[in-house]
Image (cartoon, grey):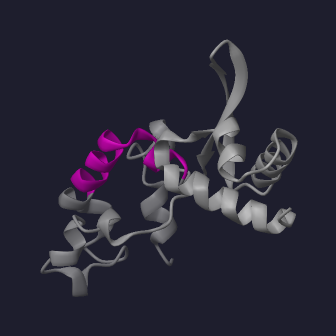
Amino acid sequence: MPKRNDLEQKALHFVINTGFKGVLQSELWRELDASSREGSRVAIKLEEKGLIRREKELQGGRWTYRLFPKRMPASIESIADCPCLLCKDTSRCDPTTTISPKDCVKLTEWIITLGENDPDALSDDGLGDDDALGDDSLAESMDPR
């Protein structure tokens, strides 16, 4: 029988690999070749550590949990379309100058399209649905003053 930490690592990797669709807790413990009891304990432990989110779901007439990763690993694909990468003003762009990410229309449009393509992508970072672009809190947090 594998150690608990090994199971936690395997479980976390499996949940992360399922992405935003998540995985049923019963599928997880089958994948880990663990008992339902071990699988439940591992899922609860990962939730307590803030690594996954568990949502109750009715599946086949029985209640179970669907597990979702709290954070997805960063990938180059996640920023490949960011307008900042090809912007001619990158060297002069700063929250304290006139050329600023706070006022950049291209950056704002790109962030909005990220939210439209994946509504949950912004909420886990503390931007939430209501605050995604409604105020300057993110821009202000970048301001070194």
Question: What residue is shown at x 76% (from left), y 47% (from top)?
Answer: 43
Main SS class of the magenta portion in the image: helix
Residue 57, compared with residue 119, is above or below; it is above
Specify whether 38 is left or right of 122. right
Residue under the point 31% across and 49% down: 114
Q: Nearer the viewer, residue 20 or 93?
A: 20
Asked whether 78 falls inside the magenta stretch, the response is: no
* Residue 117 lies in the magenta-colored region: yes
Residue 90 found in image quarter: bottom left
Tell me the quadrant of the picture where the N terminus can be found: bottom right
Spot occupied by residue 59 in the image (x, y as percentages of width and height) = 62, 20
Question: What residue range appears in magenta?
Answer: 108-124
Measured as percent of width and height from the top left, residue 49 is found at 78, 57
**In this rendering, would 101 be left or right of 68?**
left
**121 or 75: nearer the eye?**
75
- Measured from the top left, where is residue 6 in percent x and y? 77, 68
Position in image of residue 76 (x %, y %): 33, 72
Reply above or below: 3 against 119.
below
> Which residue does the image show at 24% across and 55% down from the upper left?
110
Q: Residue furthest bottom?
A: 91
Side of 80 relative to 13 (left or right)? left
- For the image, the number of numbered tags is 0
Q: Quadrant of residue 57?
A: top right
Residue in the picture at 67% in, 12% down: 61
In this rendering, would 131 be left or right of 101? right
